Image (spheres, coloured by chain):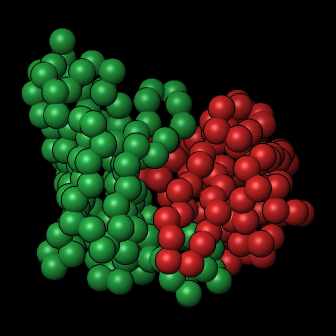
Chain colours: A green, B red
Amino acid sequence: GENVEQHPSTLSVQEGDSAVIKCTYSDSASNYFPWYKQELGKRPQLIIDIRSNVGEKKDQRIAVTLNKTAKHFSLHITETQPEDSAVYFCAALLLGEMIYNQGGKLIFGQGTELSVKP
Amino acid sequence: ETGVTQTPRHLVMGMTNKKSLKCEQHLGHNAMYWYKQSAKKPLELMFVYNFKEQTENNSVPSRFSPECPNSSHLFLHLHTLQPEDSALYLCASSQVQKNSGNTIYFGEGSWLTVV
């Protein structure tokens, strides 16, 4: 089955700096990669996602890149702010006929605790 | 508010108790999930229900028993749990579509403490 590795487990940056979180996945057939942000005591929420037919996607200060050959994808946050402090989870999913009949089996990485210091 | 509500938010139970966690989604989705979140561990997928049918049981001990009476409701029945089962249990739902994104929406979670 799919396995997702996420690094680093903790990341501390100064406000205004960039933050990069990296994930690797094992199943080359996976084709959907979302990122979730979980603030302390709250639920995980989707912040950005990317499909395997796209190499990069950007939404304001957040961007995600995907390297299918190397089977890794990364989250980039620019101009970090204290409110970006949270735990970030990457995930991988195989879309398509098989999964449609089996439900969406989203597998998460271990999470990265990001701390943005003012 | 994401349209997925869980009750109770906090639960303390003894190892011999029987309790249930409840989840309801108001988004018209066709799939529902239970995830377990422990300290310093990734989100662990426990069960998947697609169109009310259980399609995934990720080697979860039988002391956890899911029930999905319809596409909007999901339960997790708990009995004879162990202290190591203490965790945040997250319910989620999504609209699973072929060759399309599968955004999962989480509930607020139920904090379970087994004493």
Residue A84 in the image, given as x and y percentages of width and height:
30, 27
Residue B101 in the image, given as x and y percentages of width and height:
49, 65
* Occupied quadrant, residue A86: top left
Task: Inspect this view and state whether residue A25 appears.
Answer: yes
Task: Inspect this view and state whether residue B63 appears.
Answer: no
At 71% across and 31% down in the image, what residue appears? Answer: B9
Q: Is A65 situated left or right of B92 in this image? A: left
At 41% across and 52% down in the image, what residue appears? Answer: B42
The residue at the far bottom in this view is A98
* Image quarter of the N terminus of chain A: bottom left
Residue B55 in the image, given as x and y percentages of width and height:
68, 78
The residue at the far top in this view is A118
Name above or below for residue B9 compared with residue B98: above
At 70% across and 30% down in the image, what residue appears? Answer: B10
At 60% across and 63% down in the image, what residue appears? Answer: B46
The residue at the far right in this view is B69
* Occupied quadrant, residue B58: bottom right
